[in-house]
Image: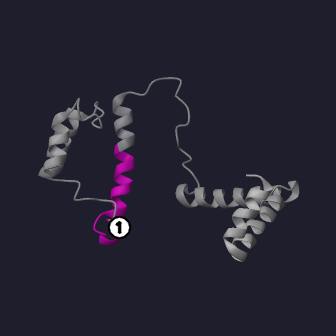
Amino acid sequence: HSLRACWMESWQKGLRGMLAHVSKRILAATCSLPYVRSIVDREVGKELAAVEKKMHGNGDSQAMVKLPHEAMSSSQIWHQIQELHAAEASVYAGVAKKWAGIYHSPDGELVDLQNRVWSLYNCSNTLYEGVFPSVRKFEAEL
């Protein structure tokens, strides 16, 4: 927009439109100043760090951040998974308040059935309904 077009548009919106337009321009000009921009960037950085810390905590000191030099056996991987699961299970076991992210008990006939179904489709991208019409059928019926 040219300056004249902006003023005409603001004028048509009345005094509030003109004030809003002028305010936007002043704010944009102020925020583009290097000193102000550095303050804004610093504050945004602080907020992002706070959000990340709230979401991720202090991190995982045992996180595997690169591939090991020697391959782990499937039994070693399975053992680590079981240890982590057991630690999580002890947190929610018997505590109704913490069941928001848990759909049902992790034991029983339903879980056995789900595991068998998962084993059939775990290497498939079931978002492709044309390739996996059975999945589309299951979703439509449920």
Hey, what amino acid is under mark 1? Lys
Question: With 107 as the anchor, is 73 left or right in this view?
Answer: right
Q: Position of residue 123 (x, y in %)?
A: 29, 30
- Quarter holding residue 49: bottom right
* Membership of 28 in magenta stretch: no
Counting every numbered tag in the picture gives: 1
Q: Which residues are magenta?
A: 82-99
Q: Position of residue 104 (x, y in %)?
A: 22, 59
Q: Nearer the viewer, residue 130 or 28?
A: 28
The residue that mark 1 highlights is 98
Image: 14 above or below 115: below
For the stretch drawn in magenta, what is the main secondary structure? helix
Q: Position of residue 142 (x, y in %)?
A: 15, 52
* Membership of 98 in magenta stretch: yes
Question: With 42 as the anchor, is 136 left or right in this view?
Answer: left
Question: With 77 as the anchor, is 10 left or right in this view?
Answer: right
